[in-house]
Image: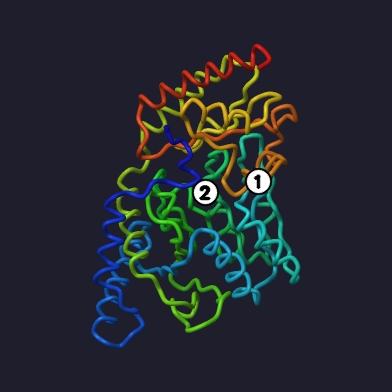
Amino acid sequence: MIYFDNSSTTQPDESVLESFIAANMKYYANPASLHIYGRETEVLLKRSKEQMLSLVGNESGEVILTSGGTEANNLAIIGLAEAYRGRGNHIITTQIEHPSILNACRKLEESGFEVDYLPVDAQGRISLDELEKTVKKETILISIMHVNNEIGTIQPIRQCAEIIKNKSRAIFHADCVQSFGKLPVNMDSLQLDAITLSAHKVNGLKNSGALILKKGVTPVAINFGGGQENGLRSGTVSVPNAVAMAKAMRISSVQEEREDFREWRNLLIAVCRPYENIRVLSPDYGAPHILSLAFKSIKGEVAVNYFQEQGIIISTSSACSSKSKNAGHVIEAIGLENKFKNGVIRISFGNTNTKDQINEFIKVLKSFMDLIERGM
């Protein structure tokens, strides 16, 4: 099988697995323990976090290890909103965020916070003018996804930061789960106060994520226990997971701006352009590893099953919403025509893919389009 669902999850790198196993075998002690084994494990944990901070251009910041991107996003939204509530109660995000952001914001609305959800254009991009109009004195938190997980739109994070810093004291958070390892993610140059990362999107292990904070930016805890992770994420810290995540981040950071990914993506877009029964949803300037397409009057599941029968794995949208029978919130937000809404698929590249696999995908795509042209 050819695997083109890397935005959902990636195959763990062998060296990451080796690091995880080695750390489990030698550094199995609780890093909170006072004995020598505990201290040695704590040193390894500290070193892993320092590597993560260096890789995102935030050496003086703080890493809060989590069970993945969802928990990190929850801690960012709820924890930071509650921490800075004394400044105001206004939050800004976008209509196409991950559900872990959107549902956290809706939960905050129930407790009196005001949330504005910025609309996007047909390519999933927010308006900087709209952002500037929406930021106000009471704004305490703004969360804007760097790369959209469904269609690959890259938001203008640096320009957003300039507006935010000029008009408010709001904390600026970005979900960088889909951008790290594919685009440069430097918190200093992007002027970000907090970012979310997930290891299994960059050939690391599942159940490993992080909320990375600038120095002086501190959320309140949203879970309670023994006070690990500076009181912000209680529970025994998995040092092997931290070691493996740092290793995956080091490997993927070397591969930023993969030209082969962009070449493949552009090739597939060119193949699709002549067909009237297909729409390219991903913008031309989008992330190099994600391509979202929509077929006219065909369910995405039909396409997924057809490609699978031909030995190719793709997805309908994000894994979080792939089993929903309705068009996803991202598809609704970009205003896709009704006759294409149910026919969305996503192709996402990873380190295991090759040019030969792209050529095979093109053959299957053309055969599928011929079937559509003939009315299936």
Q: Nearer the viewer, residue 309 or 147?
A: 309
In the depicted structure, whether residue 197 falls above or below residue 315: below
Residue at image coords 42%, 31%: 262
Marks 2, 1: nearer the viewer:
2
Report the residue that reaches farthest toward the top.
374
Q: Amino acid at mark 2?
A: His
Q: Is residue 304 left or right of residue 32?
A: right
In the depicted structure, whether residue 31 falls above or below residue 376: below
Q: Nearer the viewer, residue 325 or 254?
A: 325
Residue at image coords 46%, 25%: 266
**Circle 1 Cα neighbour tier, 10 Å, few/some/many (<14 / 14–19 / ≥20):** few
Give the Cα separation between the discs numbered 2 and 1. Answer: 18 Å
Callout 2: helix, strand or loop? loop
Residue 39 picture location, percent across and down: 27, 81
Residue 146 image label: 2
Q: Is residue 152 left or right of residue 119?
A: left
- Label 1 sits on residue: 129
- Tag 1 or tag 2, which sits nearer the N-term? 1
Q: Amino acid at mark 1?
A: Asp
Q: Nearer the viewer, residue 179 or 186?
A: 179
